[in-house]
Amino acid sequence: MNIHGTGIYHIYNRGNNQQKIFFNDENYFYFLRKCHTYLKPVCDILAWCLMPNHFHFLIDVTEKSIKLVKCGGIEMTAITTGFRLLQSSYAKGINKQENRTGNLFQQKAKAKIVSGEDNYADTAFHYIHQNPVTSNLVSNPEDWQYSSFMDFVSLRNGTLCNKEKAIELLNLSFQDIKINTGIIISEEKVKNIY
């Protein structure tokens, strides 16, 4: 993962060979529990979405996130270590469940800074939440239970996201979230968050 300092990052990864990484509801919940364990202590999650064969996070990377920690004899940032442990521990459980071996995920999660001069953080926020709609899994973002959208529109009270920080950093309002997540983002703008 290429994290080059503090800022807001779009972090994503998908199944190896674009294969499924979530096979049932419990798999999504298992992954989210691991996010609480490995990610929440080292960063502020601003938005997230889990899809059948990939995931997206919008994360505020702070000084705490880029602190170097030892992991298996090598030094990495806390956030890189968090994603590495999240993916490897989740993959072990899924490989056991599915009676399979090998990589579940593509090698490393990808990270793109979306804050700063160009500031595509709000684009990433809405894109992440509309992903299940644009992938034809549901008709409305609030119908997909495996994203933070339901938390932001008060349909659920999830604790993985730091909603207050997301609203502050992205200058969002409740109405903003509902309206802008419903507007499909152009291909050109989407390219800026990858």
Image (spheres, rainbow, N blue to C red):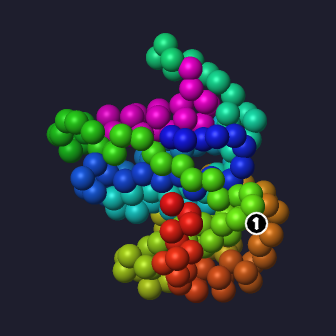
Question: Disc 1 designates what residue?
Answer: 170
* Magenta span includes 89: yes
The main secondary structure of the magenta stretch is helix
Residue 101 relative to residue 40: left or right: left
**Nearer the observer, 99 or 171:** 171
Q: Residue at x 68, y 53 (%)?
A: 8
Residue 169, percent across and down?
A: 79, 61
**Nearer the observer, 86 or 76:** 76
> Is any atom of residue 66 visible in this view?
yes
Q: Residue at x 21, y 44 (%)?
A: 98
Q: How many marks?
A: 1
- How would you rate the neighbour count of disc 1 (Cα within 10 Å): few for under 14, some for 14-19, many for 20 or more? some
* Amino acid type of the residue that numbered disc 1 sits on in the rendered structure: Leu
> Is any atom of residue 161 visible in this view?
no
Q: Residue at x 58, y 85 (%)?
A: 182
Where is residue 22, by image quadrant? bottom left
Residue 45 lies, with reference to residue 92, above or below; the image says below
Q: Residue at x 39, y 34 (%)?
A: 88
Element carrying mark 1:
helix
Magenta-tinted stretch: 75-93
Residue 131 relative to residue 177: left or right: left
